[in-house]
Image (cartoon, grey):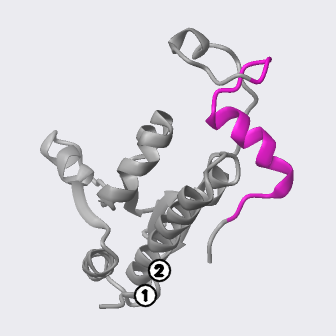
Amino acid sequence: MLKTISIISLPLIFSMLFSVSAFGAPAKDSADAGKALPKMILSHTTWQVPLEEGISLDDAIDSMKLRANSLNMKLVGHQPLSNELEAQGLKNIRRMEIFQFCDAQIANKMVRADISFAAYLPCRITVVVDENEKPWLVTLNMDMVLSMVNLTPELQTLAKKVRDNMHSIIHAGAAGDL
């Protein structure tokens, strides 16, 4: 089950995501970064999918990689954060790994249309175990971003393709679909 955004909170979330000033213009530099913005519920900006019963994290990761490859979403990065924390001497670390996927041609078209899209590249899925030892897959709620930007019909279609691919990847991982 995906956690979704409530319609009431959409304007609040987007105003924070896009650093909109009191005049409605996007922030162009870090001078606006310190201005107070309304609070938001962070979980509303993400898709959080639990692993199905009996699916190991390793199976979920393998399934995500296979699905991504079949969708031309290349694995372009991997950060095993929990391994790094253990290497730093921390104990009782819950597993947390970030996987980065990208369709380079679509990414290129999006950034050419608006350089701000570079901040959202590549698409990330984090494998994380919560405080109750429950494994999750977490990623950006792309519907939120897509509903707030002006895109040409071609770019809207490509953006929705990436969103649908990310859904497919995260659900394949959660179900252990190999």
| Left or right: 69 as drawn, with respect to 122 | left
Q: Is residue 22 magenta?
A: yes
* Tag 2–tag 1 contact (CB < 8 Å): yes
Coordinates of residue 152 in the picture (x, y in percent): 61, 52
Residue drawn 83% across and 56% down? Answer: 7
Figure quadrant of the N terminus: bottom right
Please indicate whether residue 46 sits to the left or right of residue 92 in the image. Answer: right
Q: Is residue 146 magenta?
A: no
Front residue of this view, candidates 139 and 80? 139
Query: Residue 175 bears which disc, if any?
Result: 1
In the rendered image, which residue does mark 2 sit on? 171
Name the spot of residue 141 as percent of width and height, x first: 58, 58
Q: What is the secondary structure assignment of the residue under circle 1?
A: helix
> How far across and down, in percent of the image, does residue 2 sit?
62, 72
Q: Nearer the viewer, residue 131 or 154?
A: 154
Q: Quadrant of the C terminus?
A: bottom left
Q: Secondary structure at mark 2?
A: helix
On screen, residue 42 versus residue 109, left or right, reads right
Instruction: Name which residue lies at 64% across and 59% down.
Output: 143
